[in-house]
Image (cartoon, rainbow, N blue to C red):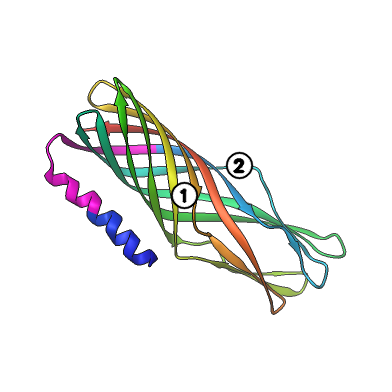
Amino acid sequence: MKTKILFIILFASISICAFPQFKLGLRAAITSSTLQADNFTTVDKTTVETLKNAKYGFQGGLIARLSLVGIFIQPEFLLSSTGGEVRLTDASKNVKTIKQTFTKLDIPVIVGTKLGPLRLGVGPVASVILNKPSESIDFSGQSIETKFNKATFGYQLNVGFDLGKKIALDLKYEGNLSRLGTGMKVGGTDYKFDSRNNQFILGLGLFF
């Protein structure tokens, strides 16, 4: 099902190139993301805690826009880095912090309205995980394995401002509709939890 949705988004994005008032450009952005997940304690009293501090990342790629009578459709194809941190504390109070960094292909498609130079929009985003962090580590003599999905789906809320015809500034909030991670295996025991990665995005687009 997820693969079909991804293909639909790709097909829709490519198809709009056939319409008039279409332009293409480059996009660069900085991101501030937090990893949201359930905290839990294992049977051997190891506490797994997701840290809420923001992790900064970068996006870069292509942006396109179709404008029709005050309405715009804006697909983007972006290579993105993001992540989060998880802290492990065992029964003897030994602590280990795991830094998780992800490389993704993000494909948002924003649909919205234009009010002069101001743009307001919302739309879906599909993310394909290209490079996941190490899924297996050793802590306090036991193996800990994190399980991640290969693709996630979410939504973006967008406020944008156009400077002339070639420069576009965008501030976005991205939330997730599906899980980034599905759980952990600690010492041979499976623990399932809901892990999601939300982020704020400040981007600059330059149209050709």
Name the residue nearer the viewer: 36 or 105: 36
Residue 85: % across, % down: 64, 52
Q: Which of 197 and 70 is in front in this view?
A: 70
Task: Name the side, left or right, on which 177 lies relative to 208.
Answer: right
Q: How crowded is mark 1: few (under 14 residues within 10 Å), some or many (20 or more)?
A: many
Front residue of this view, candidates 179 and 103:
179
Q: Where is residue 169 in the image (x, y as percent from the top left)?
A: 36, 28
Q: What is the secondary structure assignment of the residue under circle 1?
A: strand
For label 1, the residue is 81
- The answer to which of 112 and 173 lies nearer the viewer is 112
Say which residue appears at 18% left-offset and 46% top-offset: 16
Quadrant (top left, top right, bottom left, bottom right) of the C terminus = top left
Q: Which segment is the magenta one? A: 12-28
Quarter containing the N terminus: bottom left
How far across and how far down the image is residue 155, in percent?
44, 47
- Name the residue beneath numbered marker 2: 54
Q: Is 120 drawn above or below residue 101 in the view shown? A: above
